[in-house]
Image (tube, rainbow, N blue to C red):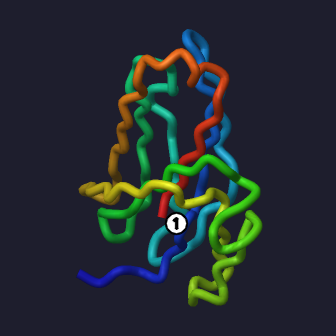
Amino acid sequence: MQLSPSCLFSLALSATLAAQTPRYTIFGDGCVGSMPKSRLSLVIPPAIGSTLTVEITNLPANLGFMMTGFSNTASPFGPLPLTLAPFGMGPCVAYVSPDATMLVLGSLNRATYTLQLPVIPSLVGGTGLWSWS
């Protein structure tokens, strides 16, 4: 399998966790590789005690990484957004601090990412950030 020269941190999802009505925003811009830009589509919004579900489309290699971060202003590599050109990733940009990473496998150029959100009252009103690479 040959991986295309696509972008790390191509798109990002910001979500305010809520007990009932979560808010979310897709931000950033995907990078073009051997396919059109990858897209994140929220299937099930992030609510406490539920499962966040995101569909990722236009996957050139049927796999990728979902980054979970707690900042969209700073990362271990410098302030965000961060150009990835010095890392050989052309015009791509990092939007989210890579605090946790999960390998996501797909097929037919799409994948589904799920994350069970625990029932922890202190999470209500918090912001989670997810980014696809």
> Is residue 58 or residue 20 the one in the foreground?
20
Occupied quadrant, residue 4: bottom left
Vertical relation: 38 (above or below) 60: above
Left/right of residue 91 with respect to residue 17 in the rendered view: right
Question: Could you tell me which residue is drawn at 67 percent across and 70 percent down?
Answer: 93
Question: Could you tell me which residue is drawn at 59 percent across and 25 percent down?
Answer: 17
Question: Could you tell me which residue is drawn at 71 percent across and 76 percent down?
Answer: 83
Occupied quadrant, residue 82: bottom right
Residue 132 in percent (x, y) is at 49, 57
> Is residue 129 or residue 59 the one in the foreground?
129
Residue at the spot of label 1? 36
Occupied quadrant, residue 79: bottom right
Left/right of residue 73 with respect to residue 58 in the rendered view: right
Residue 34 in percent (x, y) is at 45, 77
Residue 22 in percent (x, y) is at 60, 20
Mark 1: secondary structure: loop
Q: What kind of residue is marked 1?
A: Pro
- Quarter of the image with the N terminus is bottom left
Question: Could you tell me which residue is drawn at 51 percent across and 27 percent down?
Answer: 46
> Is residue 25 or residue 98 the one in the foreground?
98
Q: Residues within 10 Å of mark 1 (few under 14, many from 20)?
A: few
Left/right of residue 83 with respect to residue 44 in the rendered view: right
Residue 74 in percent (x, y) is at 72, 60
